Image: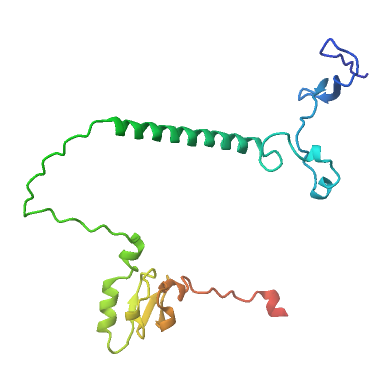
Amino acid sequence: MVQRLTYRRRHAYRTKSNKVRVVKTPGGKLTYLYVDKRAGAIPSIRPHQYTQLSKGRKTVTRAYGGSRCASCVRNRIVRAFLIEEQKIVKKVLKTKTKDAPAEKPAPEKAKTDKAAPSKKKKTMARALWKGPFFQMSLLNAIKRDTKREGVRVTARNNTIIPAFVGSRLLVHNGKEFQPLVVREEMVGQKISAFVACTKPRTYRATNANKNK
């Protein structure tokens, strides 16, 4: 049996301003949903379809209607008001300072010979004045290794500096020590960039591969 539908409003005629469509609610009940009129805004269509629209449908009748959204226009209006208020406040402060009586300069204090030393502010970024990270113990070990037998390294985050060039390092990759000869093109990079952290694993041949 077909479910009977009734209009929820008193106006039961299907006119231009009284459009409805049948919708099923989450409870499985059919009911009328009143369709409102579409807003008079720019339609969201494909770019090639905009060429077929008239100019009245492409733009909105307000300031920056064709290029800015409503929120952007609102922000611009608010910003303009704030700028004007700031100018007015500056003018008021200028007039107040002019009208104020000139104050007498305070007597200068006697300067003492022992002035506090002014601290020189570091203008460079912390990463620049701190320099690259490397262990001084590693640098000292490289200087002592005159026979080039190899210096053992476990910290792979050391930065290669010019003093390391020509030395032979034994870098630990997690399982064993791997030899590494430092060259000029390696300066400025981490040791981990040239030594793999784990040994490449080799898989045994399966029975199926052996039969082939």
In the picture as drawn, the residue positioned furthest to the bottom comes out as 147
**Residue 119: where, in percent of width, then height?**
20, 56
Visible in this render: residue 23? yes
- 99 and 90: which is toward the camera: 99
Query: At 31% across and 65% down in the image, what residue appears?
Result: 129
Left or right of 82 on screen, residue 32: right
For the image, the number of numbered tags is 0
- 172 and 114: which is toward the camera: 114
Quadrant housing residue 59:
top right
Q: Quadrant of the C terminus?
A: bottom right
**Residue 194: where, in percent of width, then height?**
46, 76
Visible in this render: residue 175? no
Q: Quadrant of the N terminus?
A: top right
Is 66 above or below relative to 191?
above
In the picture as drawn, the residue positioned furthest to the right comes out as 1
Quadrant housing residue 147:
bottom left
**Residue 31: where, in percent of width, then height?**
83, 20
**Residue 175: where, in percent of width, then height?**
42, 72
Query: At 27% across and 88% down in the image, what residue appears?
Result: 146
Colour option used: rainbow
Query: At 81% across and 21% down in the image, what residue appears?
Result: 34
Left or right of 101 on screen, residue 40: right
Query: At 63% across and 76% down in the image, what residue appears?
Result: 205
Left or right of 117 on screen, residue 210: right
Is 98 above or below relative to 111?
above
